[in-house]
Amino acid sequence: NAGVTQTPKFQVLKTGQSMTLQCAQDMNHNSMYWYRQDPGMGLRLIYYSASEGTTDKGEVPNGYNVSRLNKREFSLRLESAAPSQTSVYFCASKPGQGEGGEQFFGPGTRLTVL
Amino acid sequence: EDQVTQSPEALRLQEGESSSLNCSYTVSGLRGLFWYRQDPGKGPEFLFTLYSAGEEKEKERLKATLTKKESFLHITAPKPEDSATYLCAVREGNTGFQKLVFGTGTRLLVSP
């Protein structure tokens, strides 16, 4: 099992460009998450998906959109990138749709917006 | 609003020098406190979940404990490979879905 995979690992964008961060898990998990991690801020939830076909906003959703393409894949799109979106982005997944269980994280995508 | 504060921000230990990391939280009814380890350039890796005051969990040189206001991660006789950032998180809100609020972490460096 590869676990949670993310592509790309690194990306540099210019202000106003768009891009999609890809995430896939091979553990048959129902729940998936997108976080961003900034120095001194901790991990903050952008969007989550409790199951295939459903998505909901987290703490910092502005400037982002998501798609739960199928049970395996959960993508994060930046329509018009801004320097404030420079961050490290992590995708995570969890078995089940409820409260319990641990989240499994991917290796991250390091995004710089110039 | 649920909040998580971790201290110290950074900790340097000699190999074998035991210590503790602190995670204090303010939530309206704790429904789970989580500890994760994060190595540089990698995603967080799950360590423990604690649910009620008095609960303890152990894994190798690590032991996590929980009170009504805080959690401690005790590191006994640490080795250089224990160097990492340790993150604490609590479950947020009253929904049946798991959403976590993370602290900013404690960076631990263990020198040989």
Image (cartoon, coloured by chain):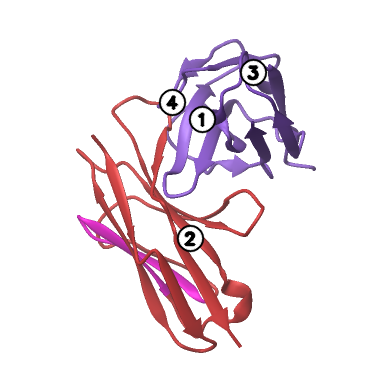
Chain colours: A purple, B red
Q: Position of residue B24 (x, y in %)?
A: 27, 56
User: For the point 46% across and 55% down, which residue is it?
Assistant: B87
For disc 1, the chain is A
Q: In the image, what residue occupies the spot 52% across and 42% down? A: A37
**Residue A16 at x, y percent in the picture:** 63, 16
Residue that extends furthest to the right in the rendered view of this protein: A1
How packed mark 2 is, by other alpha carbons closer than 10 Å (few <14, some 14-19, many 20 or more), is many
Spatial separation of the CA atoms under disc 2 and disc 3: 29 Å
Answer left or right for B81 relative to B91.
right
Residue designated by label 1? A84
Q: Which residue is mark 4?
A: A60
Marks 2 and 4 in Cβ contact (< 8 Å) = no
Question: Hey, what amino acid is under mark 4?
Answer: Val
Q: Secondary structure at mark 1?
A: helix
Which one is in front in this view, the residue at disc 3 or the one at disc 1? 1
Q: Characterize the local packing of mark 1: few (<14), some (14-19) or many (20 or more) Cα atoms within 10 angstroms.
A: few
Q: Given the image, on which type of amino acid does mark 2 rest?
A: Tyr
